[in-house]
Image: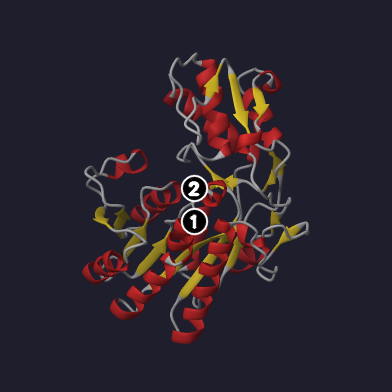
Amino acid sequence: MSKKALIIGVSSQDGSYLADLLLEKGYTVVGTIRRTTTYSRENIAHLAGKIGIEAADLTDGESIAQAIKKHHPDEVYNIAAMSVPADSWSHPLYTGEVTGLGIVRVMEAVRHHAPHARVYQATSREIFGDIHAESANENTPILGNNPYGIAKAYAHMMVKSYRESYGMFACAGILFNHESPRRSLHFVTRKITAAVACIVNKVSAPPLDELGRPLVVDGKLKLGNLDAWRDWGYAKEYVEAMYLMLQNSAPKDYVIGTNTAYTIRDACRIAFEHVGLDWQRYVLSDQQLMRPTEITALKGDYSQARKDMGWAPRVSFAELIKIMVDADLKRFR
């Protein structure tokens, strides 16, 4: 009999890749999306008829409980969140409700209705905030410095609390930035690669940025702090780590990263060079897109995940950006 997995937030970048992976492994997959009049979602359009869909929301504990009671999953993956750190400043209460308290509602539902289920929580590099270190591992202090990072830190610690208090198989992946062609346009890597495609293809009506403005205006892309450093990996590989964590003999939290770091300038350079353009002619830094606080350069030390689970990143940052540019060139014709 095949295992059943419930993916909370299946239409997200990570949720859709995870659904692909679990289906390949023979799972029965059910995913949740927020209540809507249509189930149409670009990231999971190819999964129509292959997975079950339930309407549920992390702010509505009863909807989560009903999904778990109905399906009695063997594994529960909470991928959903208010997932844009920069937006958490304008929506701090909502960020706390979804990103922080959301996993508590999941854990309560599992504890009461499917206590056998193994639970994965998507934590974030943002829990380390402005810590000054070259790299972070599972023992690095938690010092979140924005509403999103602090909410993720609360969620991370609550998973540990439920694990220790109730003996639940619950673990968290402290994931560093991970991108793909399925990434939302609110994230800087997709903004860059989509802008490249719009410029090359001379798109007359480019998509809008987070301020509601066209992504490309007069051939220019506006970004925030170009000197911000990030450890960026490939989302398709990161969901493999999520799966492996729930196959362990005992629950354990892991840092998932690449142990490398690049600036937004680097991302721009690689993306524009891939199509033969000089990025400095097309990219501007806009004060309106700056964060009130910035996180420091920090790499994700994945050595424990490699030792225990055999997980390691395979796609380089330059390869990832080129994959995304090529996908957006096809998308924005």
Residue at 47 percent across and 79 percent down: it is 162
Question: Can you tell which quarter of the image residue 150 is in?
Answer: bottom right
- Along the viewing direction, whichever of 159 and 147 lies nearer the viewer: 147
**Do callouts 2 and 1 mark residues in contact (Cβ within 8 Å)?**
yes
Q: Residue at x 66, y 34 (%)?
A: 287
Residue lying at 43% horizontally and 60% vertically, measured from the top left: 98
Q: Position of residue 239 (x, y in %)?
A: 48, 54
In this figure, which residue is indicated by the disc labeled 1? 240
From where the camera sits, is residue 284 visible? yes
Question: With respect to residue 115, does 276 lie above or below?
Answer: above
Label 2, label 1: how far apart the Cα atoms are: 7 Å
Tell me the kind of residue under disc 2: Lys
User: Which residue occupies the foreground of this view, 125 or 222?
Assistant: 222
Instruction: Give coordinates of residue 158: x percent, y percent.
Output: 50, 74
Helix, strand or loop status at disc 1? helix
Image location (x, y in percent) of residue 66: 24, 68
Q: Is residue 248 visible?
A: no
Query: What coloring was used for the rendering?
Result: secondary structure
Which amino acid type corresponds to the residue marked 1 in the rendered image?
A: Glu
Q: Label 2: few (<14), some or many (≥20) within 10 Å?
A: many
The residue identified by callout 2 is 236
* Figure quadrant of the N terminus: bottom left
Determine the secondary structure under disc 2: helix
Please tell me whether residue 284 is drawn above or below residue 303 in the rendered image: above
Which residue is rendered at x = 68% and y = 18% of the image? 281
